[in-house]
Image (tube, grey):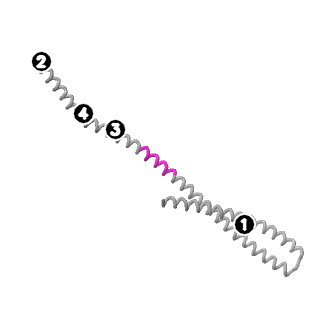
Amino acid sequence: MYRVRVFSVALLMFAFSTSAFSQDKDPHEGMKQEHAAAHVDHDRWQAEHSKWRVEHLRAMAMLAKLQAKIYEHEAELEEHAEEIRAHEDHARHHGDEIAEHEESGNDDDHNKLAEEHSDFMKKHQAMSAKHDSLHAGHEELMTLIKKLFQADKN
């Protein structure tokens, strides 16, 4: 019986020491698991952060392209404005020629004026088409920019 008691006490002490060791280990194991989970979060956050930075850089590149398109459109508008001024000057000059012709009545001048007028009208039609194209391009550009800023408000 003494042996059974000693064995029981030894078994009880072993169980107690194992239990105490397990209790000591659990808090550290929990901390390690939390650290491991934090590392997973950090890796994911860093990957997302890198992705967002790339997206921001690409957005900045797109904005630079948009800015370049606006500058190019502005240059086209300025060229068109100069063409309009030159065309208007030509119209005034042609009007003066018509008035002079009406005073002289020379038929040779009439044929020349008719030919110049035909050229003037062809140029005018081409400028009208260009103006319509620039107008459509302008409206499209402004619509896209407005959508971009409306999306930013949401």
Rendering coords of residue 129 (x, y %) = 72, 64
Quadrant where the N terminus sits is top left
Rendering coords of residue 40 (x, y %) = 38, 40
> In the image, which is nearer the foreground, mark 4 or mark 3?
4
> In the image, which is nearer the foreground, mark 1 or mark 4?
4
Q: Amino acid at mark 4?
A: Lys
Q: Label 4 to label 3, Cα distance in Å?
A: 16 Å
Q: Label 1 to label 4, Cα distance in Å?
A: 85 Å
Tag 1 secondary structure: helix
What segment is highlighted magenta in the picture?
A: 46-58
Residue at image mark 2: 3
Q: Amino acid at mark 3?
A: Ala
Rate crowding at label 4 as few (under 14), some (14 to 19) or many (20 or more) other CA atoms within 10 Å. Answer: few
User: Looking at the rendered structure, which numbered label has been put on residue 36?
Assistant: 3
Residue at image mark 1: 128
Q: Mark 1 or mark 2, which is nearer the start of the sequence? A: 2
Q: Quadrant of residue 121?
A: bottom right
Residue at image mark 4: 25
Q: Is residue 148 left or right of residue 134?
A: left
> In the image, which is nearer the foreground, mark 3 or mark 1?
3
Name the foreground residue: 60 vs 139: 139
Magenta span dominant secondary structure? helix
Tag 4 secondary structure: helix
Residue 55 highlighted magenta (yes or no): yes
